[in-house]
Amino acid sequence: MNFTKVQGAGNDFILVETNDIKRNWSPVAMAMCNRHFGVGADGLLLLLPSDVADFRMRILNPDGSEAEACGNGLRCLAKYIADKGLLPGKFEGGEVDKESLGKGLVNTEAQKILVETVAGIRRVKLHRAGGRLTKIQVGMGKPEFGAKDIPVAIGQGKENVVNIKSMLSCSITIEGRELPLSLISMGNPHAVYFWQHPVSDFPLSQLGPKVEQHRLFPSRVNFEVANVINSHQIEVRVWERGVGETLACGSGACAVAVAARQHGYIDNIVDIKLPGGMLNVEWDGIGEVFLSGPAEIVFTGEWPDKGHSSRED
């Protein structure tokens, strides 16, 4: 099996381009993502054909579970698609011929592709200057605050939806430490804790798994610890559901930005400083959240595809 190792701000993935939609990919993800006995990664990224978009993306965590959303994975997928010449050739300014595209003669501002994910269809814009890819921006959808959307087992109202103010001030106690959390869905569940000290001082390895598996979260949760540096920058560490601590998390960065804006800590645009690098998030407080950041191809290789041939029903 051919694979490509990719990373976005240190959030690394094993990307496999495949047409095999019936395969049970969970054991493959568990084997390949193992950092001691496999390739090593935060997730297995599958590039698949789609009937409703230009491409389809699935992402499986190292524990075999499937993630609904992944901003860094989307950017890495787009980088791979661009580098491999798989782009459909449609620019916002109109059609371009593949010959001009291949020679780097196109100077159009942005090229758009649509990617099908578990959380819905996501728009990705690839910005170019002089034929060179300079920026990848991902539309991450609108944040959701309903109990069913996150989901969260908390005092539900008549319409089974928790008031947004309640979701932004939900406290749990872990090992005697009270954690006031802001709960948000970016297509996947997030719990954001604003900490007034350097995030490096927070005992994430100790408390992260306990927040992830707290009874409040029936589908587990991604946990972000955030320190607001100023109105334009937030420092963040992330404990990802099914993965553990990662160097970066795109949907987590978006959740932090949304929570910070709702609390009045920031304006519409903010830089999220993570251990693996910087991500940029834009949100107007109403519509879709947009995420930008680095995406790189690290290396390619072959995996001895043995013993993982099971198929899904």
Image (cartoon, rainbow, N blue to C red):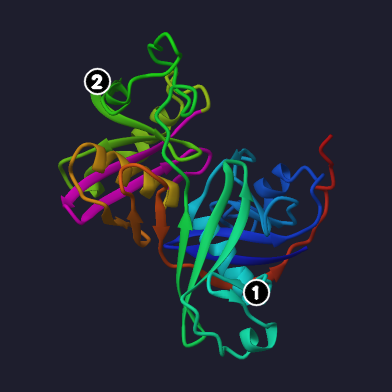
| Residue 179 visible in image | yes
Tell me where residue 117 appears, x and y as whole percent. Answer: 61, 47
Q: Give the residues in magenta.
A: 220-245
In this image, 225 relative to 10: left or right? left
What is the x, y in percent for residue 293? Answer: 41, 64
Q: Does residue 247 appear in this view?
A: no
Q: Nearer the viewer, mark 2 or mark 1?
A: 1
Name, please, the residue furthest toward the front: 94
Q: In this view, does 276 lie to the left or right of 225?
A: right
- For the residue carrying disc 2, how many other residues have a C-alpha within 10 Å: few (<14), some (14-19), or many (20+)? few
- Residue at image position (70%, 42%) is 26
Rendered residue at 16%/44% (across/down): 197
Q: Which is nearer the eye, 67 or 82?
A: 82
Residue type at mark 2 is Gly
Magenta stretch: includes residue 240: yes
The secondary element bearing badge 2 is classed as: loop
Write down the residue under mark 1. Answer: 89
The residue where tag 2 is placed is 176
Considering the whole magenta stretch, tell me its main secondary structure.
Answer: strand
Q: Is mark 1 on a helix, strand or loop?
A: loop
Relative image position of residue 96 (x, y in whole percent) = 63, 80
Looking at the rendering, in which quadrant would you find the C terminus? top right
